[in-house]
Image (cartoon, rainbow, N blue to C red):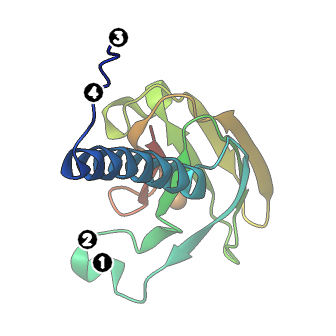
Amino acid sequence: MMHMETKKWSTSRVLTVITLVSLAIGAITGLALGYAARYEGPQQRDIYLFNNSLPFDQDKFKLPHDIFAPDRITVNRGDKIVIHYINIEDANESHTFNMGPSAGSLAPGPYDIDYSIAAGQKVNITFTANIPGVFAYVCLIHQPTMTGYLTVLG
Ligand SMILES: [Cu+2]
């Protein structure tokens, strides 16, 4: 008579294995769902950017009252950026938008942008945000107040 030996797992061992496998599947599913819910592919970002001014005495504080609105722009890496830059001055006053080399030490970085617009004018500034980081943008005429920051999430 031949004996076939079969290895039997104890009930507690079977339960332990089932528990571990369940935990692993749950963790993987959770991570996948979290990533899917959060992820956005590169897209076009249309941003409307204006000059604005704060109501204070420029002479008293020896500062320009001009600022950017908005002064914080956040995008994802790879997004195509279209900044609709509009000079809403009623006075005859120009504003610039500078980043990178044209801004010197005021706004160092890889994005090389140099625009100037007269009162009542509008310009579209387009570029691809392919390098992550936080980068200043400035109006060269109204420093230090007319400064904003572009954040490119990596
Ligand atoms: Cu300005």
Q: Is residue 129 visible?
A: yes
Could you say which quadrant of the image residue 95 lies in?
bottom right
Mark 2 in CB contact with mark 4 (< 8 angstroms): no
Mark 3 in CB contact with mark 1 (< 8 angstroms): no
Q: Secondary structure at mark 2?
A: loop
Mark 3 in CB contact with mark 2 (< 8 angstroms): no
Mark 1 and mark 4 lie on one chain; the one further toward the N terminus is: 4
Q: Residues within 10 Å of mark 2 (few under 14, many from 20)?
A: few
Q: Which residue is mark 4?
A: 7
Q: Amino acid at mark 1?
A: Asp
Q: Specify the label residue 59 is tagged with.
A: 1
Q: CA distance from mark 2 to mark 1?
A: 5 Å
Q: Specify the label residue 62 is tagged with.
A: 2
Toward the viewer: 48 or 18? Answer: 18
Which tag is nearer the camera, tag 2 or tag 4? 4
Mark 3 and mark 4 lie on one chain; the one further toward the N terminus is: 3
> What quarter of the picture does the C terminus occupy?
top left
Locate residue 140, reporting x and y percent: 46, 47
Q: Amino acid at mark 4?
A: Lys
Could you say which quadrant of the image residue 125 lies in?
top right
